[in-house]
């Protein structure tokens, strides 16, 4: 079964990652996840809420790590979910695991300030 991205997020894969994430005009939060990953499903509602609250200032994208192992390897993703913020084509934040929305937003804001 394919990894279903949470509502409001942008699915990316190996063919769209560079354009949608690295060449994006603004910052992008990327979740590296997988369908079999329970914590990935747990953080889905948090990602949906952030996508809605930060629409226009932060894109929230979801990458199926099983379908794009070369991208996961490029960024040394060792566990799922891994959340990364990219700005101007470079990662500026990387965290693994789930966290409450308020903590994740604080980490994102700190990385982008």
Image (cartoon, rainbow, N blue to C red):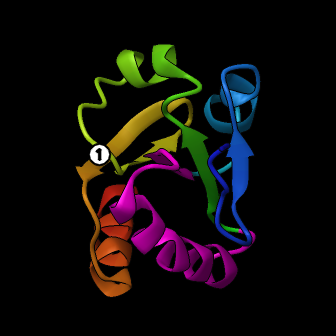
Q: Is residue 39 above or below residue 34?
A: below
Question: Where, quadrant-wise, is the C terminus in this rendering?
Answer: bottom left
Residue 36 horizontal/vertical position (percent): 44, 49
Q: Is residue 55 above or below residue 3?
A: below
Q: Is residue 97 above or below residue 46?
A: above
Residue 78 belongs to the span the image colors magenta: no
* Residue at x 42%, y 59% (from the top left corner): 40
Question: 21 or 1, which lies in front?
Answer: 1
Rendered view: 2 above or below 102:
above
Q: Tally the numbered discs.
A: 1
Residue 52 position in % (x across, y down):
68, 81
62 sits to left or right of 93? right
| In the displayed structure image, the side of residue 12 where residue 75 appears, left or right | left
Residue 13 quadrant: top right
* Neighbours of disc 1 within 10 Å: few (<14), some (14-19), many (20+): some
Please state which of residues 30 and 92 is positioned toward the viewer in this rendering.
30
Q: Is residue 25 visible?
A: no
Tell me if I can see residue 51 in this picture.
yes
- Could you tell whether 40 is left or right of 87 in the image? left
**Mark 1: secondary structure:** strand
Which residues are drawn in magenta?
28-56
Q: Nearer the viewer, residue 38 or 106?
A: 38
Where residue 98 appears, as percent x and y from the top left, is 29, 67
Residue sitting at x 50%, y 29%: 66
Query: Which residue is identified by label 1?
Result: 94
Q: What residue do we see at 71% from left, 47% from top?
A: 11
Q: Please say whether residue 55 is one of the residues in the magenta stretch.
A: yes
Which quadrant is the N terminus positioned in? top right
Q: Residue at x 69, y 62 (%)?
A: 9
Residue 97 spot, x, y in % from top left: 25, 58
């Amino acid at each position: 079964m394919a990894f279903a991205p949470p509502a409001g997020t942008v699915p990316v894969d190996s063919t769209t990652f560079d354009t949608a994430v690295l060449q994006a005009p603004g910052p992008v939060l990327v979740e590296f996840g997988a369908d079999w990953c329970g914590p990935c499903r747990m953080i889905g509602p948090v990602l949906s809420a952030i996508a809605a609250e930060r629409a226009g200032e932060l894109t929230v994208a979801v990458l199926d790590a099983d379908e794009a192992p070369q991208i996961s390897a490029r960024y040394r993703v060792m566990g799922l979910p891994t959340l990364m913020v990219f700005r101007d084509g470079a990662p500026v934040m990387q965290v693994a695991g789930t966290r409450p929305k308020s903590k994740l937003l604080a980490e994102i804001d700190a990385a982008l300030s």
